Amino acid sequence: MLRQILIPLLCGLVFGTGLAISGMTDTQVVLGFLDVAGDWNPALLMVMVGALAVTIPGFWLAQRRSTPFFATQFFLPASRAIEAKPVVGSVIFGIGWGLYGYCPGPALAALGSFAWQPLLFVVAMAAGVYLEKASGTAR
């Protein structure tokens, strides 16, 4: 049980620290990456390349195991069908990301700055999650 709490906590701390060190908690860095027609900033591209350099070999190794390191089974999607709800959610996510420059991970990591903007974003995000759950359409 303790392992089920500590491993995700440690992974989240490492992820959040990486976001903060790489500057991804600064909305201007993210918006600079999305501004391909203006003053383009490739910093987010470098973070993505670094993430893929770790993730691709990790998934390759994980697929060769019968069970995960810290769980009793893999939890993989049962269907590969493309459904409307995740596509619409992705579009909403992308629009919000492009308008403000935050997505959930960097916003949570930016809470450590004690600025009001990430706090407002996280409160709005939590309200959206609550409204989705309350509407009865959540899975």
Image (spheres, grey):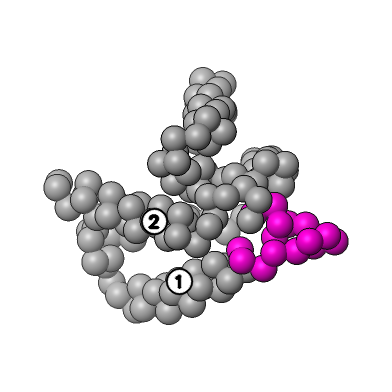
Nearest the viewer among 2 and 75 is 2
Label 1 CA crowd tier, 10 Å (few <14, some 14–19, many 20+): few
Whether residue 76 is visible to the viewer of this picture, yes or no, is no
Q: Which residues are magenta?
A: 30-44
In the rendered image of this protein, does residue 61 appear above or below residue 36? below
Q: Which residue is mark 1?
A: 55
Q: Is residue 38 left or right of residue 113?
A: right
| Badge 2 density bin: few <14, some 14–19, many ≥20, Cα 10 Å | some
Find residue 83 and name its label: none
Residue labelled with disc 2: 17
Image quarter of residue 64:
bottom left
Question: Residue 54, percent across and down?
Answer: 44, 74
Q: Which of the two residues, 45 or 6, is positioned nearer the viewer here?
A: 45
Residue 114 on image: x %, y %:
44, 35
The residue at the far right in this view is 37
The three-letter code of the residue at mark 2 reads Thr
> Which numbered mark, 1 or 2, is in the foreground of this view?
2
Residue at 43% x, 79% y is 57
